[in-house]
Image (cartoon, rainbow, N blue to C red):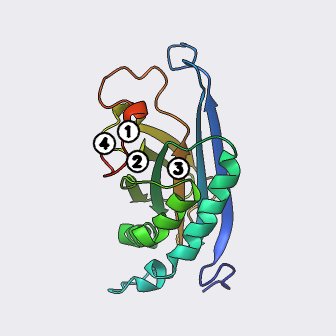
Amino acid sequence: MPTPNFGAYHIRKWFTHVEDALANETGQLHDGLSLRKFVVSAAIHNPYAHRFSVDLGDVVDRSDELGREFGRRAAEIAGDVAVQSYGKAAIVGIGGEYEHGNAFLTQTFADPVRKAIGGGKSWVPSTGKVAGPGATIDIPLAHKDALYVRSHYDTVSVSYGDAPRADEVVIAFAFASRGRLHARLGGLDAADVRGDDGLH
């Protein structure tokens, strides 16, 4: 077990990914505001690697502190830009189980992130897989206060050249400043969100 350096966790590396879309895929310039997507990620030692454990509480129960740090970093990157969408993901190294990644991504972890970016009523869309270094993960995004806002269904793709190692999990939390550029498929408009039930 590597020496813990963040509470009970050993974090080998933090990653930050930022992209600003000025036009859509066919070259149409943004319609008022560019689309910023950014991802905060960490390569963390997996304490359950190479073994089976019924109880995953060692990760779940302590993940609120991890969530606060993810939230702090996210708020710092966002600056004055309001976050409208979010999503999360895990890539588990080949010595672990997909379930190990999910243990890092529960509400215990997510709630401090929500708080740091100004709240969030909707559930956080999530994905994950077991893979090795260099794997790409497509992180789903949705409106943070109303899942029925179709314009904000989106994806941000990231990869990590040297992670996850076999005994690591890469945890990622993604954010976006707006919906898709030139979204035009109807549904609830972001300007009309009530934000009281996570759906409308």
How far is disc 4 from disc 3 in space, using C-alphas? Answer: 21 Å
State the image coordinates of residue 163 (x, y, percent, origin top left). 59, 60
Query: Do the residues bearing badges 4 and 2 touch, measured as CB atoms within 8 Å?
Result: no
Q: Are marks 2 and 3 in contact (CB under 8 Å)?
A: no
Q: In this rendering, is residue 148 above or below 169?
A: above
Viewer-side label of 4, 3: 4
Separation of disc 4 and disc 1 at Cα?
A: 6 Å
Q: Are marks 1 and 3 in contact (CB under 8 Å)?
A: no
Badge 3, how many Cα within 10 Å: few under 14, some, many 20+? many
Q: Relative to 1, is 195 above or below?
A: above
Looking at the figure, which quarter contains the C terminus? top left
Confirm or deny contact between disc 2 and disc 1 (CB under 8 A).
yes
Cα separation, mark 1 vs mark 3, equals: 21 Å
- Relative vertical location of residue 21 with respect to residue 124 in this rendering, above or below: above
Mark before the other along the chain sequence, 2 or 3: 2
CA gap, disc 4 and disc 2: 8 Å
Q: What kind of residue is marked 1?
A: Val
The residue lying at 46 percent from left, 32 percent from top is 179
